[in-house]
Image (tube, coloured by chain):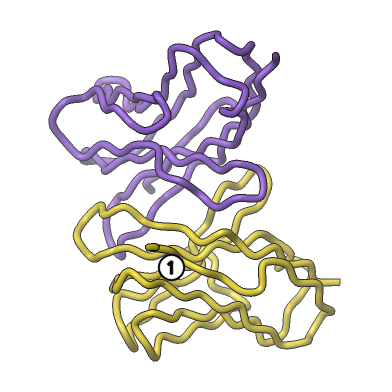
Chain colours: A yellow, B purple
Amino acid sequence: EAQVTQNPRYLITVTGKKLTVTCSQNMNHEYMSWYRQDPGLGLRQIYYSMNVEVTDKGDVPEGYKVSRKEKRNFPLILESPSPNQTSLYFCASSGLSRGETQYFGPGTRLLVL
Amino acid sequence: AQSVTQPDIHITVSEGASLELRCNYSYGATPYLFWYVQSPGQGLQLLLKYFSGDTLVQGIKGFEAEFKRSQSSFNLRKPSVHWSDAAEYFCAAFTGGGNKLTFGTGTQLKVEL
């Protein structure tokens, strides 16, 4: 089954404790992206990657890092989480053709205390 | 800057009634337009998309949307709403570089039985 998986689905942590949210897709997609969803703000792009070792900032990259060492994986790293990063995070993937449908993971709900 | 606006934060309809969710975009050219649905605790599922051609687009679950260039709108419609349609609906536009999707802030649909 074609899918995007994220782990963990739920995470409670404390300020400053480094964490990683994993994202994996099995559709051989070149493009992967991270979004955060906040009430009243919709989804905002954090980082994206057009291919292995190619990443770039989205609209709200501050406080986040990503890496793309393998085509299928695109982890999101919070090196020193803060309470304002409490949010619902989505990973997405697609092909590179303009306007291709993006497939979303189930989301990771993060609470930073 | 490109933007997507969903003017209605919440909408309540009775089961069996018709539904229209509004979406307006701001973009110089014709964007690629999408409607996604997010059921509680779920990721985003694509309902339909518009790239070009016929301005009335059919999607899954009985939804359709009409692109109106003169009004910069891409409203989502359903003739008869089912209780299972209760969810949050997001309009999005692919407006260029980086395969980035720009999302509206979402419309929460409640269905009264």
Give the vertical position of A91 relative to B8 (above or below): below
Q: Where residue A65 sits: x, y (%)?
A: 54, 83
* Occupied quadrant, residue A20: bottom right
Residue at 69%, 84% (x, y): give it: A19
* Residue assigned mark 1: A33
Q: Residue at x 56, y 41 (%)?
A: B105
Left or right: residue A55 compared with residue A17: left
Task: Classify the position of the N terminus of chain A by image quarter.
Answer: bottom left
Most extreme residue toward the left is B53
Q: Secondary structure at mark 1?
A: strand
B97 w.r.t. B41: above or below: below
Q: Is residue A74 left or right of residue A76?
A: left
Q: Quadrant of the C terminus of chain A?
A: bottom right
Q: Residue sitting at 31 percent across and 52 percent down? A: A101
Q: Say which residue appears at 36% left-offset and 40% top-offset.
A: B34
Pinpoint the chain carrying mark 1: A
Dot 1 crowding, Cα within 10 Å, few <14, some 14–19, many 20+: many
Q: Is residue B30 above or below residue A68?
A: above
- Residue A58 x, y percent position in the rendering: 45, 67
Q: Callout 1, which amino acid?
A: Ser
- Examine the image and state in which quarter residue B67 appears: top left
